[in-house]
């Protein structure tokens, strides 16, 4: 036993010596060919990526191969001139704003701060935080968006400090102002835009600065100032912002309660910018102005025409619901029920509006004292929309079997 252990020891020692001697003998050769092999790995990745693969690449095997080759380049040769390029190329072939992409971009920024891609990597992460903030602001807890605006601001600020010569530095300064705007800090946002205004007068971003300045004045209810800024954008003829600014002018009249001028303003959008999404929206907004002016029949006709002409417009669902509310406000319960049913029965609409519409049908019958009809509609609610409304406090969530039983008991005893 003892002899075997001694023999085993010498075998292990001999193996170790041989291993390290071999490694030592080859080490110089490895270092001599380090850059040659690194370049070979990079060229192999580039060759496999020609033509460039995209996330929609039908050949999933090719996409995986390209990703693997880029990763091999920077993992095996981190000190080569192609390592940062390989990291960027791999990150660009991962779904946008996924954590893996962020991790690669952070690695690029931290390990290769002088890379030509570092500023773009930092900007991409910052923009992602800003977009998350914008999405959070649309949710049920908009206050959670502030943390993401703050993160985005820090990253944009880092870019302006570390990469002052970058073309993205100006974009980042503008984006910092937009972070203030997103948080509703109108004074700081206005100050930031004012600081950029003169410097950016010959930059394409000037139109966005002027437009968002108009939006700030709108939020501050300084409508005359808002119209001046919006008109400047309209006069610039900017293909994307001019229609929005023209709409903004109409919105200032609507917010002030001048519904006749608002209607005229929406019509100007339709006439000046036909075949645009903004013009589509304006068709719906004309109906809203009519409703506020208590021209209920005109409002219904206008909105229903807009729904028929633009069924895929993002306003269609809400405005079909709005039509029902106008009928109800005009004391036309039958028209309201019919309009609500168009929402409830339309499988292409989102779940919550459909559930809400079905509830409103039952509620109208309940208010009219037609209890059996109300129960029938509430039963449809429970059958066709078994999941609760996403807003916990929504009235439809109070309807259950116990509610129907009590409603039936009241009907039988005549205590409504």
Image (cartoon, rainbow, N blue to C red):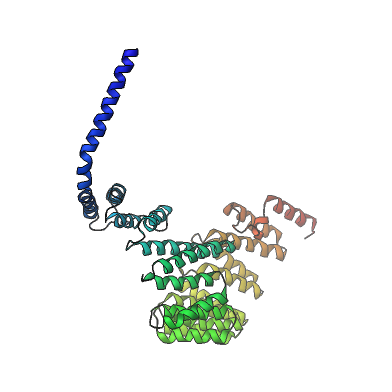
**Considering the image in quadrants, where does the N terminus appear?**
top left
**Considering the image in quadrants, where does the C terminus appear?**
bottom right
x, y (%) of residue 365?
A: 68, 63
Choose top left, top right, bottom left or bottom right for residue 170. Answer: bottom left
Q: Left or right? Give the position of 282 relative to 91.
A: right
Q: Which residue is drawn at 54% across and 81% down?
A: 251
Q: Is the residue 290 above or below the residue 319 in the image?
A: below
Q: Which of 372 and 337 is in front in this view?
A: 337
Instruction: Examine the rendering and report whether any part of residue 86 can be seen.
Output: yes
Q: Is the residue 255 above or below the residue 376 in the image?
A: below
Choose top left, top right, bottom left or bottom right for residue 46. Answer: bottom left
x, y (%) of residue 265?
A: 51, 85
Q: Nearer the viewer, residue 301 or 287?
A: 287
Instruction: Examine the rendering and report whether any part of residue 55 can be seen.
Output: no
Q: Which of 61 and 363 is in front in this view?
A: 61
x, y (%) of residue 395?
A: 66, 60
Q: Left or right? Give the position of 337 relative to 151.
A: right
x, y (%) of residue 351?
A: 54, 58
Q: Is the residue 266 above or below the residue 22 in the image?
A: below
* Total numbered badges shown on the rendered structure: 0
Q: Residue at x 63, y 69 (%)?
A: 334
Q: Left or right? Give the position of 106 relative to 23.
A: right
């Amino acid at each position: 036993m003892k002899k075997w252990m001694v023999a085993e020891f010498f075998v292990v020692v001999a193996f170790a010596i041989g291993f390290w001697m071999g490694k030592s003998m080859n080490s110089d050769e490895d270092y001599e060919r380090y850059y040659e092999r690194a370049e070979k790995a990079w060229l192999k990745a580039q060759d496999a990526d020609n033509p460039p693969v995209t996330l929609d690449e039908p050949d999933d095997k090719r996409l995986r191969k390209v990703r693997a080759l880029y990763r091999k380049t920077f993992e095996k040769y981190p000190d080569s001139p192609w390592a940062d390029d390989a990291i960027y190329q791999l990150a660009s072939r991962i779904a946008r704003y996924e954590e893996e992409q962020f991790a690669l971009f952070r690695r690029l920024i931290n390990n290769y701060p002088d890379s030509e891609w570092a500023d773009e990597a930092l900007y991409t992460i910052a923009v992602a935080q800003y977009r998350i903030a914008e999405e959070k602001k649309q949710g049920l807890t908009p206050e959670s968006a502030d943390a993401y605006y703050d993160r985005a601001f820090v990253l944009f600020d880092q870019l302006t400090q570390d990469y002052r010569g970058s073309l993205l530095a100006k974009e980042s300064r503008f984006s910092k102002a937009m972070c203030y705007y997103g948080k509703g800090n109108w004074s700081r946002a206005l100050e930031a835009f004012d600081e950029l205004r003169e410097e950016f007068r010959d930059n394409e971003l000037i139109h966005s600065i002027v437009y968002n300045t108009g939006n700030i004045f709108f939020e501050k209810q300084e409508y005359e100032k808002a119209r001046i800024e919006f008109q400047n954008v309209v006069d610039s003829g900017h293909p994307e912002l001019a229609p929005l600014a023209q709409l903004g002018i109409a919105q200032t009249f609507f917010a002030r309660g001048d519904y006749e001028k608002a209607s005229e303003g929406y019509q100007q959008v339709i006439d000046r910018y036909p075949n645009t999404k903004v013009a589509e929206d304006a068709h719906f907004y004309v109906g809203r102005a009519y409703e506020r002016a208590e021209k209920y029949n005109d409002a219904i006709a206008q909105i229903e025409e807009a729904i028929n002409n633009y069924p895929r417009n993002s306003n269609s669902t809400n405005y079909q619901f709005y039509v029902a509310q106008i009928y109800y406000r005009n004391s036309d319960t039958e028209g309201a029920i019919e309009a609500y049913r168009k929402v409830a029965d339309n499988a292409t609409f989102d779940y919550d509006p459909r559930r809400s519409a079905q509830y409103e049908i039952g509620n109208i019958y309940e208010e009219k004292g037609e209890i059996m009809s109300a129960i029938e509609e509430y039963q449809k609610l429970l059958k066709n929309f078994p999941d609760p409304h996403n807003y916990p406090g929504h009235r439809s969530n109070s309807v259950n079997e116990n509610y129907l039983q009590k409603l039936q008991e009241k009907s039988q005893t005549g205590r409504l």
